[in-house]
Image (cartoon, rainbow, N blue to C red):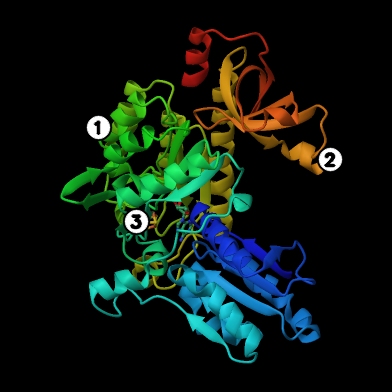
Amino acid sequence: MKKLYIETVGCQMNLLDSELVVAALRKEGYELTGSTDEADTVLFNTCSVRQHAEDKIYSALGRLKDAKRAMPDKVIGVMGCMAQKDQRLIFRRAPYVDIVVGPGQLHQVPQLVREARSKPGGQRLEVSLGRTDGKADAIKRSHESFDPLRDPTMRPTPFQAYVRIQIGCDKFCTYCIVPSVRGPEQSRPPSQVLAEARQLAGEGCKEVVLLGQTVNSWRHTEDGRAWRFSDLLYALHEVDGIERIKFVTSYPKDMTDDVLRAVRDLPKACKYLHVPAQHGSDEQLRRMKRGYTIADYREMHDRAKRWMPDVAITSDFIVGFSGETEGDFQQTMDLVRECRFKNSFIFKYSERPGTKAADRLPDDVPDEVKRRRNNELLALQNQISEEDNQRFLGARVGVLVEGPSKAAVKAGRVGGEGPLQLTGRTMCDRIVVFEGNPRQIGQTLPVAVYDANAHTLFGEVVTEHAGPELFQLAGSA
Ligand code: 5AD
Ligand code: SF4
């Protein structure tokens, strides 16, 4: 058996890409190892969204220098967004790297690894075309990635799977590197998405998480029928065995009535929307070229809450983007106070070479100001998340049990038969921790909540037989 070490940073797209690469390499006789020392092949699946993510990978590569000297036929590969962005620069900074593969070329990984092993010495680069390096069709084709092979052991859990429905992005927000590294927006045909969901359900998967950079912008015409994203949700809802459907990440402008109606009306649709606002000030949104105003965002948010009072909405925010004044920042604080997001991911602006902002807008907010604003916004969001979770005290929620809690894993209390601290999620994506036993993993159970903090609900499984009314209550939480 050959041994593969793989490290993944970044978003769910990258996790799914790694799953697929592992599946392909298993077919070649690889098994996973947690140690770079004993690995025959070491792969990094990388992210370019912020400088910090890149720095982490370059230092991890630096640490491999001696290992490669000691074991020269160890194949070292860099895949993903940083591979597409930096290309040959990676060979210059780490000359012992054997292969560099962009996210649109991952189907080539098994062959590239094979070649590197059989003919050591040469460096192999496989990336997609840049956004202006050819005809539109050729650029699109060069970004087509692969999804056919799945490896259940690489999933978040055996009951949950990511399903890619869209690749790339055409929105070109000025701060964002994604449109240049992941290429043009392309939607996957509904027949393929549905076939994959059926296959996953047949393997025991209960929850599918649809992935796209602007997932709710998905649309596709197949066999003369024009599908909207909401049509896809209705069709997926018919797949037997699938109990929950989630989707990330949504684009505010495309949160149309038909999408909200589908989420509201389909019992399997999670009442959870990740719709990044990015900022609370119109001037900043304009500089970011987000394509909407704060009034538009508020309208979308209010509509979602009006139609589904229990819907959980989450957001991303960037602090310290070009030209952000204290007044602008306070408008982000106001938006968070008003929308009371379930949670927010907050990022300090990180200038990315090759973006419009890097070309035209100065990175002029000092780092200590970015840090202070980040902390201030995070403190506000945490306070809101905690207050919001307190509402669940005494309530019963339906939890899809994912596995042992982090604490149980840390304490090494997994794999046995006895009682165990478990974790799972509600229909509105809230994390719930409770005492259970390994047999309950993969089931959907009613749990009574007795404690809550900003990030977690703590509960107890309700053992009496629940009537239909109770389950409805549990389902809507
Ligand atoms: N700097 C900081 N944060 C960024 N994001 C995207 N690009 C940048 C950048 N250059 C954030 C956005 C996006 C999330 C995935 O990362 O908030 O929604
Ligand atoms: Fe980046 Fe904007 Fe596309 Fe999101 S919508 S991936 S932030 S360009």
Disc 3 element: helix
Give the residue drawn at x 42%, y 35%. 334
The residue singled out by tag 1 in the image is: 257
> Which circle's residue, 2 or 3, is located before the other in the chain?
3
Q: Quadrant of the N terminus?
A: bottom right
Rendering coords of residue 161 (x, y %): 52, 45
Disc 1 element: helix
The numbered disc on residue 411 is 2
In depth, the one of 230 and 290 nearer the eye is: 230
Q: Is residue 448 toward the left or the right of residue 10 in the image?
A: right
Q: Amino acid at mark 2?
A: Ala
Give the residue drawn at x 27%, y 80%. 134
The residue singled out by tag 3 in the image is: 288
Q: Where is 249 relative to 311, above or below?
A: below
Q: Amino acid at mark 1?
A: Asp
Rendering coords of residue 362 (x, y %): 41, 67
Nearest to viewer (mark 3 / mark 1): 1
Q: Is residue 200 toward the left or the right of residue 464 in the image?
A: left
Nearest to viewer (mark 2 / mark 3): 2
Q: Is residue 164 visible?
A: yes
